[in-house]
Image (cartoon, helix red, strand yellow):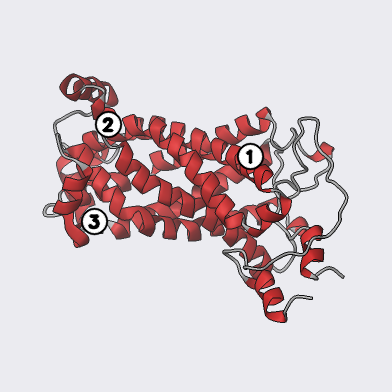
């Protein structure tokens, strides 16, 4: 039998698997699906066929998850364009735009109310494409990686699974986002350069070629990959913790609206951490896309340790609200289309036996 401390560690440790050696137990082989994959009890809940519109992990499931990503990212980022515009201006011109309220005041005085909407078109297009790849590929990679690890390891290392799946998805999502992000920042931070996407994109291409749209992709990875890793891993573990320690009844007994409230709260908590983790790289991206001929290293040196944190308060407010709304919309799409919505993972019975936890 294992020492009591290790048993307690296995039950309590929320973010990493305990270091122990499992004894081998003879168990019946798991049944496989017609595609040859093991049962995905870690990934999917046992739901009656009549309750869902498609099979978990099917092409229809991935497509609708991608559609949910388009709505959650495209709509939310477009709604907060005024706040994003002020945040970018604080980052690239802190001498003129000193605070959030000062930034709004100057923008309204110089550009009027319409000026607060600058960059909405590249924002909507770019972040819709990013949402498609981010949420759609996350579901794909999470299933692929969990099948590779096996049921027990997928549970033990679930935080690492969330981190790896989200990082893989975001890598491709940023390639889709980069061109529109470059246009957005140029429109928002260079007065007189261009007022619309139709003006901005051809002008950038004529001046700098295709590189103008992708020169920010590396700092974008630096910003978005840590952000997304925190966004998904923190959200998944926060949902798990809320149902375990805060919500007074099991998830299966909660109504759909109650479950969506938990989703929103977990999303906001995750969003605050996301903003802090990714803000330095966000500052570099904003300055880099404004200037011609600069590199990420040059911008980072010029900003310095204090300069990279300019605009953090605005970004915490923006990203916290944004992340909460994104998860709420994404989960609402799943509810509307009756997609499988797995509950927080539980320790497999086979692992309980190996740890001596099974009755």
Q: Residue at x 50, y 39 (%)?
A: 169
Q: In the rendered view, does 148 fall on the left or right side of 330? A: right
Q: In the rendered view, does 148 fall on the left or right side of 324? A: right
Disc nearest the viewer among 1 and 2: 1
Q: Residue at x 29, y 31 (%)?
A: 214
For the view shown, which residue lies furthest in the left direction?
95
Distance, label 1 to label 3, CA atoms, is 37 Å
Q: Along the line of sight, which residue is nearer the eye, 271 or 344?
A: 344
Q: Is residue 148 visible?
A: yes
Graded by Cα atoms within 10 Å as few (under 14), some (14 to 19) or many (20 or more), the crowding at tag 1 reads some
Per the image, label 3 sits on a secondary structure element best described as loop
Per the image, label 2 sits on a secondary structure element best described as helix
The correct choice, above or below, for 215 with respect to 6 in the image is above
Q: Along the line of sight, which residue is nearer the eye, 240 or 298?
A: 298
Q: Which mark is residue 13?
A: none
Graded by Cα atoms within 10 Å as few (under 14), some (14 to 19) or many (20 or more), the crowding at tag 2 reads many
Which residue in the structure is indicated by mark 1?
144
Disc nearest the viewer among 1 and 3: 1
Q: Along the line of sight, which residue is nearer the eye, 18 or 299?
A: 18
The correct choice, above or below, for 272 with respect to 193 in the image is below
Q: Which mark is residue 183?
A: 2
Q: In the rendered view, does 358 fall on the left or right side of 168? A: right
């Amino acid at each position: 039998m294992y020492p009591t401390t290790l048993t307690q560690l296995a039950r309590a440790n929320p973010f990493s698997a305990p270091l122990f050696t499992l004894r081998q137990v003879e168990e019946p082989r798991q049944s496989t699906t017609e595609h040859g994959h093991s049962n995905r009890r870690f990934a999917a809940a046992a739901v009656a066929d009549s309750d869902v519109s498609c099979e978990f992990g099917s092409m229809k499931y991935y497509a609708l998850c991608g559609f949910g990503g388009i709505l959650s990212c495209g709509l939310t980022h477009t709604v907060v364009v005024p706040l994003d515009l002020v945040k970018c201006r604080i980052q690239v011109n802190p001498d003129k735009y000193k605070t959030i309220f000062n930034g709004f005041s100057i923008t309204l005085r110089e550009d009027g109310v319409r000026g607060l909407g600058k960059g909405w078109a590249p924002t909507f297009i770019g972040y819709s494409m990013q949402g498609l790849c981010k949420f759609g590929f996350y579901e794909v990679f999470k299933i692929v990686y969990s099948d590779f690890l096996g049921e027990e390891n997928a549970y033990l290392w679930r935080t690492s699974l969330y981190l790896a799946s989200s990082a893989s998805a975001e890598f491709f999502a940023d390639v889709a986002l980069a061109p529109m992000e470059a246009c957005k920042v140029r429109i928002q931070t260079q007065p007189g350069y261009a007022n619309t996407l139709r003006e901005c994109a051809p002008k950038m291409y004529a001046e700098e070629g295709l590189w103008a749209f992708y020169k920010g992709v590396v700092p974008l990875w630096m910003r978005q990959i840590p952000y997304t890793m925190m966004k998904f891993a923190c959200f998944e573990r926060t949902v798990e913790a809320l149902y375990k320690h805060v919500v007074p009844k099991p998830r299966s007994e909660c109504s759909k609206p109650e479950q969506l409230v938990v989703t929103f709260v977990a999303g906001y908590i995750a969003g605050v951490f996301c903003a802090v983790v990714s803000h330095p790289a966000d500052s570099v991206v904003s300055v880099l896309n404004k200037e011609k001929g600069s590199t990420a290293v040059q911008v980072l040196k010029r900003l310095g340790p204090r300069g990279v944190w300019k605009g953090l308060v605005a970004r915490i407010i923006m990203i916290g609200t944004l992340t909460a709304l994104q998860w709420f919309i994404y989960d609402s799409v799943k509810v509307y289309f009756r997609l499988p919505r797995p509950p927080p993972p539980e320790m497999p019975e086979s692992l309980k036996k190996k740890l001596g936890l099974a009755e």
